[in-house]
Amino acid sequence: MTVRSITSSDRELYIQLAKKFYSGEATLHAANLNHINRTFDECVKGSPYAKAFIIEENGKTAGFALFSFTWSNESGGMVVWLEELYIVPDFRGKQIGSRFMDWMMDEYKDVSRIRLEVCHCNNGARRLYERYGFKPLDYEQMVWDKENK
């Protein structure tokens, strides 16, 4: 398995994978193409707040991951958010998710926390994350979206 940073030539691939992510059981709402494009642009320009990766297996696209980065007083340091992890259906059940998690845990071993969200109905993802020691937080998240005002 290879995990590589997205490049400007990956736009169509990234959009396709993000749309599939947002049409499955991993999210509560459909994709917003405007947001996907803005996220891609932010990652490609080298933002310190967002990074995206393409996951490949034997030269074929097996999925993608999107991370964001923040500081947390609660955890006492840098926090990596695994915002999105999508494994292409043909590659599921082949340990790609587990190998990606191994890569992620090594890549970000020096941060104070790795955080993620998972829908209650996404049982496969929940089992994967729990195997790596992730535990639910008893927080209820609230959001304010500029676009809704």
Image (tube, grey):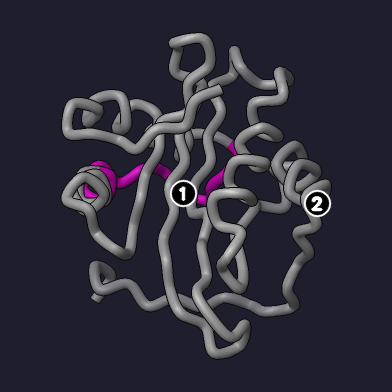
Rendered image quadrant of residue 122: top right
User: Closer to the camera, 93 or 105?
Assistant: 105
Left or right of 46 in this view: 96? right
In the depicted structure, whether residue 118 falls above or below residue 101:
below
Left or right of 97 in this view: 16? left
For the point 54% across and 90% down, the residue is 73
Q: Are marks 2 and 1 in contact (CB under 8 Å)?
A: no
Find out whether residue 101 is within the magenta segment: no
Residue assigned mark 1: 29
Left or right of 82 in this view: 113? right
Q: Residues within 10 Å of mark 2 (few under 14, many from 20)?
A: few
Q: Amino acid at mark 2?
A: Glu
- Which numbered disc covers residue 130? 2
Q: Amino acid at mark 1?
A: His
Q: From which residue to which does the magenta span run? A: 25-36
For the point 47% across and 32% down, the residue is 3
- Percent x, y of residue 139: 67, 79
Rendered image quadrant of residue 1: top right
Rendered image quadrant of residue 102: top right
Find out whether residue 29 is within the magenta segment: yes
Quadrant location of the C terminus in the rendered image: bottom left
Number of disc labels: 2
> Disc 2 on helix, strand or loop?
helix
Cα–Cα gap, marks 2 and 1: 24 Å
